[in-house]
Image (cartoon, rainbow, N blue to C red):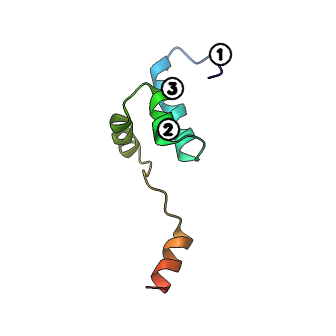
């Protein structure tokens, strides 16, 4: 895995920065849940719980797809 160095304010811990980066990369579909959990330094189960606490959906179900499914039900 490539390494990148970034400078963050003293008010943000390295662990917090990794968590928020992992959450965002998962949310936009760039990392799987397992990959994001590893980046953040948590087990997959714990990371999934953290997603919920931060208001990020674990399952992505686009509105248009839901509407199509309801029309065909």
- Secondary element under disc 2, as helix, strand or loop, is helix
Farthest residue toward the bottom? 72
- Which quarter of the figure is the N terminus placed in? top right
Q: Is residue 40 above or below residue 48?
A: above
- Secondary element under disc 1, as helix, strand or loop, is loop
Residue underneath mark 3: 18
Where's residue 68, x and y in %? 53, 79
Where's residue 69, x and y in %? 48, 78
Q: Are marks 2 and 1 in contact (CB under 8 Å)?
A: no
Disc 2/disc 1 C-alpha distance (Å): 19 Å
Which residue: 49% across, 35% down? 36
Which residue: 52% across, 69% down? 63
Tag shown at residue 42? none
Where's residue 54, x and y in %? 41, 42
Point out the tag, 3 or 2, that comes first from the N-terminus.
3
Q: Residues within 10 Å of mark 3 (few under 14, many from 20)?
A: some
- Which quarter of the figure is the C terminus placed in? bottom left
Residue underneath mark 2: 23
Q: Are marks 1 and 3 in contact (CB under 8 Å)?
A: no
Tag shown at residue 5? 1
Q: Residues within 10 Å of mark 2 (few under 14, many from 20)?
A: many
Point out the tag, 2 or 1, that comes first from the N-terminus.
1
Which residue: 59% across, 18% down? 8
Disc 3/disc 2 C-alpha distance (Å): 9 Å
- Residue 60 falls left or right of residue 3: left
Disc 1/disc 3 C-alpha distance (Å): 12 Å
Q: Residues within 10 Å of mark 1 (few under 14, many from 20)?
A: few
Q: Where, by quadrant of the figure, is residue 59 drawn? A: bottom left
- Secondary element under disc 3, as helix, strand or loop, is helix
Where's residue 21, x and y in %? 55, 32
- Residue 71 falls left or right of residue 7: left
Number of on-image labels: 3
């Amino acid at each position: 895995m490539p390494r990148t160095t970034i400078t963050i304010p003293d008010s943000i811990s390295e662990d917090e920065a990794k968590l928020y980066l992992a959450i965002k990369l998962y949310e936009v579909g760039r990392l799987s849940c397992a990959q994001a959990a590893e980046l953040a330094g948590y087990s997959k189960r714990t990371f999934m719980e953290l997603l919920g606490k931060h208001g990020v959906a674990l399952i992505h179900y686009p509105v248009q797809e839901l509407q199509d499914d309801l029309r065909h039900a």
